[in-house]
Image (tube, rainbow, N blue to C red):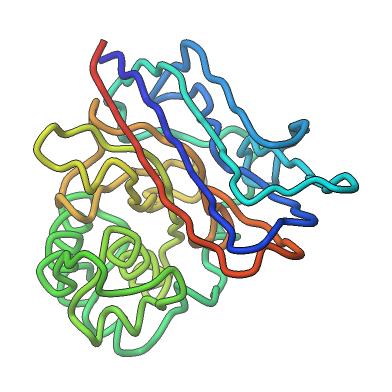
């Protein structure tokens, strides 16, 4: 399926912005599950491309206000077309970190005995795909999807105990449970096309390692309790959300910031 994606982030400031440095994880890459037909980015400064340790393409720009300049709004645009292939199982190339790297505890997806106890009800031994899918559905049932119930700082354990969250939280809980069981797992950011679920256009899911020696992974959409398919566009991967947010940055000036995001996805 070929999908056309447009992702616009608008910032409004109550005072003039003097300086901003932002990094964008907003560029999908071609791989086993997708082919990027074309992609473009726009920002208030010159964009410089680089790659992080997980193979993601990221861009950074710096804005410095000139004398007398009064900037109170800014815009970051990402747009392009991606052919989705529906491949949910794949092997990493040698340039990617070893799967053991994704066993490490992170702030948002730390292992915990309570999560391990929950996970052992479904996964009793080595990684088994049917068992992992059953676990993902149990996570979705336990951490019910509830818009605006959490923030980007909510941890997996907090969402698990609260019993509510969004796709980011469900992915973090799945990742943290797998790590608690000794299974390498990582957080994936991306897009999801469904005409009846516009709130999930910006989406998140989990990669779980099926075989460490062959570096084989399965991409599991925890929110929908299934393997990824042609509705999914992979954007970036990391140890948790903090490692690959759509946009991260610092600023001076601007007063109070208001941010709005608009994403449209249409089949071509």
What residue is at 47 percent from the left and 17 percent from the top?
Answer: 36
Q: Is 129 left, or right, of 111 in this rendering? A: left
What residue is at 23 percent from the left and 16 percent from the top?
Answer: 267
What residue is at 27 percent from the left and 64 percent from the top?
Answer: 170
**Looking at the picture, how far across and down is residue 259, in whole percent?**
47, 55
Q: Quadrant of residue 27?
A: top right
Furthest residue toward right: 67
What residue is at 41 percent from the left and 78 percent from the top?
Answer: 155
Q: Quadrant of the N terminus?
A: top left
**Looking at the picture, how far across and down is residue 215, in whole percent?**
50, 43
Q: Quadrant of the C terminus?
A: top left
Q: Nearer the viewer, residue 74 or 203?
A: 74
The image shows residue 96, relative to residue 259, as above or below, that is: above
The image shows residue 80, relative to residue 17, as above or below, that is: above
Q: Is 149 left, or right, of 95 in this rendering? A: left
The image shows residue 115, relative to residue 3, as above or below, that is: below
How many marks are shown on the rendered structure?
A: 0
């Amino acid at each position: 399926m070929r999908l056309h994606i447009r992702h616009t982030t608008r910032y409004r400031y109550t005072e003039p912005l003097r300086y901003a440095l932002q990094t964008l994880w907003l560029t999908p890459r071609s791989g086993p599950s997708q082919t990027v037909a074309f992609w473009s980015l726009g920002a208030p400064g010159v964009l410089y491309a680089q790659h992080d340790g997980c193979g993601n393409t990221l861009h950074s720009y710096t804005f410095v206000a000139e004398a007398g300049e009064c900037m109170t709004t800014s815009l970051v645009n990402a747009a392009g077309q991606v052919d989705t292939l529906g491949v949910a199982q794949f092997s990493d190339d040698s340039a990617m970190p070893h799967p053991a790297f994704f066993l490490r505890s992170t702030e948002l997806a730390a292992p915990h005995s309570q999560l391990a106890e929950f996970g052992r009800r479904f996964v009793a031994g080595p990684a088994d795909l049917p068992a992992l899918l059953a676990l993902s559905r149990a996570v979705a049932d336990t951490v019910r999807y509830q818009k605006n119930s959490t923030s980007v700082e909510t941890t997996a354990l907090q969402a698990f105990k609260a019993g509510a969250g969004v796709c980011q939280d469900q992915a973090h809980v799945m990742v943290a449970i797998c790590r608690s069981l000794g299974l390498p797992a990582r957080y994936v950011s991306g897009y999801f096309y469904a005409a009846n679920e516009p709130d999930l256009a910006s989406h998140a899911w989990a990669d779980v390692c099926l075989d460490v020696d062959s570096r084989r992974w399965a991409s599991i959409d925890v929110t929908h309790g299934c393997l990824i398919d042609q509705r999914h566009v992979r954007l970036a991967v990391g140890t948790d959300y903090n490692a690959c947010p759509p946009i991260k940055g610092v600023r001076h000036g601007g007063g109070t910031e208001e941010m709005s995001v608009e994403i449209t996805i249409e089949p071509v």
